[in-house]
Image (tube, grey):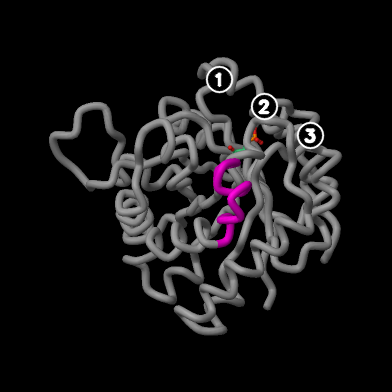
Amino acid sequence: MNRKKIIMGNWKMNLTVPESTILIQKLKKEVPVSTKAEVVVCPTFIDIYSASEELKGSNIKVGAQNVAEEEKGAYTGEVSVLALKGFVDYIIVGHSERRNIFGESDKIVAKKAEIAMRHDIRPVICVGETLHEREDKLSKVVVLSQLEASCKHLTGEEIAESLIAYEPVWAIGTGQVCSSEEAEKMAEHIRGLIKSLYGEKVSGSVRVLYGGSVTSASSKSFRKSKNIDGLLVGGASLNHQEFAAIVKNYGEKKK
Ligand code: PGA
C-alpha cells in the first residue's frame, strides 16, 4: 500500500500572528520543494486565515489544532468546522494536551473526528499513554481503547482517509523521544486493531504518525519504520531550520 509520508508541525500556543508570518516566510524558503512528503503546519486559530493566504501556491498545507464538536450555535469561544473549512486540510483531534488539560474524553474526540470528516477535512486522531500507564505496562491497552472509542463514529472508508498519531504523553515536550522500535511496535498494534475492526484494506490505507520530542536528529530513525508514515512535531517545528531538516531527513528518502 502506497501511503504518502507526512510531516506536521504543531505550533501549539506559541506564536503571535506576526511571529508566525515570519516563520512561514522562512519555511517557504527552506522546506525543500523536492520533498515527496506532505508538509503541514498547524497554527493557532487566529492565524489560520493569514497562514493559509501566505502559504497559497507553496507545498506547505495548513491544519488546525482543534475544532468544536458542534457545527454551529451558542458555544462562546469555540471555533467551528464551518469556520475552518476552506482554510485547512487537517484537524488535530484529541491531542493529549486537550485530553489532559481540557478534559476531553474519547466521546468528545470521536465527535470532533466525525465533524471534521463530515466536512471533508482529515482528522489527525491522537492517542497515547501517560508515563504512569507505561510503567504499569498498560500502553497497548490504553492506546487501543482510546483509538477504538475515538473512531467510533467513522466508517471504514473514513478511517482509511484519517490519520492516527501515536503520541506517548511521556515523550511530549520532555526531550525523551520514544525509540523508533517501540513506536513501530505500537503502530503495528494500531494497524492490527484497525484491521480487525475495519478490514485489511482500511488498515493498509490509514496513515499512522509518531509524535513526541521529534528533532532533526531523531527523525532519521523513523525513516525505516514500516508502519509509521509521518511525524507530528511540536517544539522543533517552531525553528525553521530544524523543521526543514526534519522534512529533509524524513521526507525525502523513500521507504
Ligand atoms: P513535542 O510535541 O515535539 O514538543 O514533544 C509533539 C506534540 O505534542 O504534538
Q: In the image, 109: left or right of 171?
A: left
Q: Which residue is mark 2?
A: 238
- Tag 3 near tag 2, CB within 8 Å: no
Res. 38 visible in picture? no
Residue type at mark 2 is Leu
Question: Which element is circle 1 on?
Answer: loop
Question: Which element is circle 2 on?
Answer: helix
Q: Which residue is mark 3?
A: 30
Magenta range is 130-140
Pointer 1 or 2: first along the chain: 1
Q: Main secondary structure of the magenta part?
A: helix
Pointer 3 or 2: first along the chain: 3
Classify the position of ligand 1 by quadrant: top left, top right, bottom left or bottom right.
Answer: top right
Q: Which residue is mark 1?
A: 15
Numbered disc in front, either 3 or 2: 2
**Residue at figure coordinates x 23%, y 46% from the top left:** 70
Residue 84: image location, x then y, percent: 37, 42
